[in-house]
Image (cartoon, grey):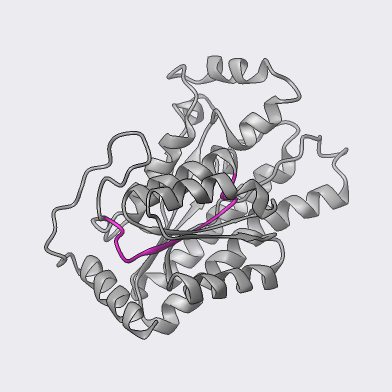
Amino acid sequence: MNEALNNQKVALIRRRNGSDGEAVAPFAGNGHAQTSDLFKNQIAMVSGGLGDIGVAIVWELARHGAAVAIGDVRSISYARNLLADLKGQKVPSLYQEVDVADADAVQSWVEKTEQELGVPSLIVPNAATATTASCHQITAEAWSRELRVNLDGAFYLAQAATKRLLHHKLPGRIVFLGSWAANTAHRHLPAYCVSKAGLRMLCKCMALELAPHGILVNEVAPGFVDGGVSRRLSQKDPASLERSRAKVPVLKLITPQEVAQQVVHLCHPANQHMTGSTLLMDGGLSLLS
């Protein structure tokens, strides 16, 4: 493990300083085969890793050479096909059933990742939930649960992982999965909007503190995605996705793969200065309000 950690340190420091000596591969293509060594010797952690967006992020990081630690509240039986596919592509991976609202469970997941794969340097807090209820109807339990998953859970993962980076004096990237709902009010989604607004400020606070250590912290903020929370909410109203599509100025919904590609963009070693920023990808929705 000491030799592996030394190799990881050398690779990450070289990438941080832009002295790796390799051409940076473009982001392109679909499919799961590895396309570059962009994240060689790096370990990624993705919470909510069995959802539509989570799986897309896992594959996109793996395609560029990262080992992946996947966390989700579902049992390992739900992860077996994904793990088998990753193994088939020779991607080092592990799965942990973890509730990100439990700080101790997140800490254990980070420790297990370091022991089995190495120090995680690409951190993607992606787990999220949403409750459809008006401000006067949402229960205290639902309100608390949503903030604990969407906001507290993101903090627990980012905090636990960056402590290890700081301990080993390694650079890294954190990419929070936010939403355009952080600054646009939505009916019947009060806890979701509030949690994503809090996540945006968390991103800025962590970015300010961690920048001197070579750890850049940013946020991807999608609009209507054909997957994830948007798709789960549409299950109660199948026509809602089409209504959402019609509202978007570009007249298209975002695919999970597009979200994943923007995560790669923010983790890219060529990104040396973008931190505390929100990459808004809402198809122009925010221009309407």
95 on left or right of 190: left
- Determine the residue positioned at 44% across, 72% down: 209
90 on left or right of 113: left
Residue 243, given in percent of the width and then of the height, sits at 61, 15
- Locate residue 71: give its quadrant: bottom right
194 on left or right of 136: left
Task: Tell me the quadrant of the picture where the N terminus can be found.
Answer: bottom left
Work out whether residue 177 can be spotted: no
Work out whether residue 108 can be spotted: yes
- Determine the residue positioned at 60% across, 37% down: 228
User: Magenta span covers which residues?
Assistant: 38-50
Name the one closer to the observer, 117 or 239. 117
Name the one closer to the observer, 11 or 128. 11
Q: Is residue 46 magenta?
A: yes
Task: Tell me the quadrant of the picture where the C terminus can be found.
Answer: top right
- The rendered magenta stretch, by its main secondary structure, is classed as loop
Name the one closer to the observer, 140 or 25. 25
